[in-house]
Amino acid sequence: MFLTKGHLASPNKFKELEDLRNLLSKLKVDYKLPFDEEDLSMLLLSVLRCDDISSSYGILKKKGKRRYIDELKVKAWLEENLIPNTVVLRMDDPEILKLLFFSIEITYSMFLGESRATLMQKGFRERRRSFEAIVVDQFIGKLGEVAVKRFLEVHFNVNVELD
């Protein structure tokens, strides 16, 4: 599948490639990937953008003035990098539920004045943030901690306890 610099520069042009969509849907089924085609295409585009011709991935090949994707290298990248390093978190996971309750609890204590955290949004004009906005910010901020914890437990066999 041949690419131009325009395809690499524009995610929309990249996603419109029919051959790419076919490849990604086939890979999604073959490898039972937990991504949809759009997420998978953005991951692949990121790799292609940082993957020069001489890099270790070698997914992007050059033939004359044209560039093309080596499908075997894409499969190798999936098997060696993406799949082993992917952490899947589900909403019914006890850690995620605990995190949700913690986010609601800490936000509630902020509204009661039991915390030194601010309810105001920083910026030129400070405005009061809603309860929901603060819960979401708390949840997203801590979600990364849960993902890193899971990654460390799986890949380094350590027990991480979050507070």
Image (cartoon, rainbow, N blue to C red):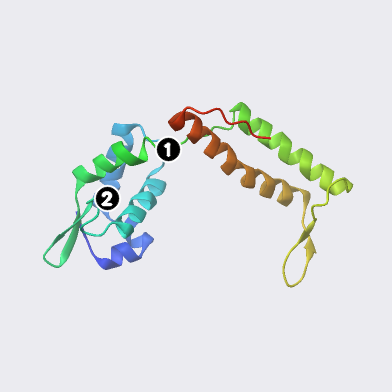
Residue extending farthest to the left is: 64
Q: Say if mark 2 contacts mark 1, CB within 8 Å.
A: no
Give how far across and how far down residue 40 sits, in percent: 37, 46
Whether residue 16 can be seen here:
no
Instruction: Give the left or right position of residue 97, taking residue 14 as reference.
Output: right
The image quadrant that residue 119 belongs to is: bottom right
Q: Residue at x 59, y 41 (%)?
A: 145
Residue picked out by circle 1: 86
From what the image shows, is residue 105 above or below residue 58? above
- For the residue pair 161 and 71, the one nearer the viewer reads as 161
Give how far across and how far down residue 100 sits, in percent: 68, 36
Q: Secondary structure at mark 1?
A: loop
Q: Which amino acid type corresponds to the residue marked 2 in the rendered image?
A: Leu
Residue picked out by circle 2: 20
In which quadrant will I find the C terminus?
top right
Give how far across and how far down residue 113 sits, in percent: 88, 48
Q: Secondary structure at mark 2?
A: helix
**Tag 2: Cα neighbours inside 10 Å, few (<14), some, or many (≥20)?**
some
Instruction: Give the left or right position of residue 35, taking residue 113 as reference.
Output: left
Instruction: Give the left or right position of residue 72, taking residue 92 as reference.
Output: left
Give how far across and how far down residue 32 sits, in percent: 35, 31
Q: Residue 69 shows which numbered tag?
A: none
From what the image shows, is residue 134 above or below residue 106? below
**Tag 1: Cα neighbours inside 10 Å, few (<14), some, or many (≥20)?**
few
Q: Which amino acid type corresponds to the residue marked 1 in the rendered image?
A: Thr
- First in sequence: mark 2 vs mark 1: 2
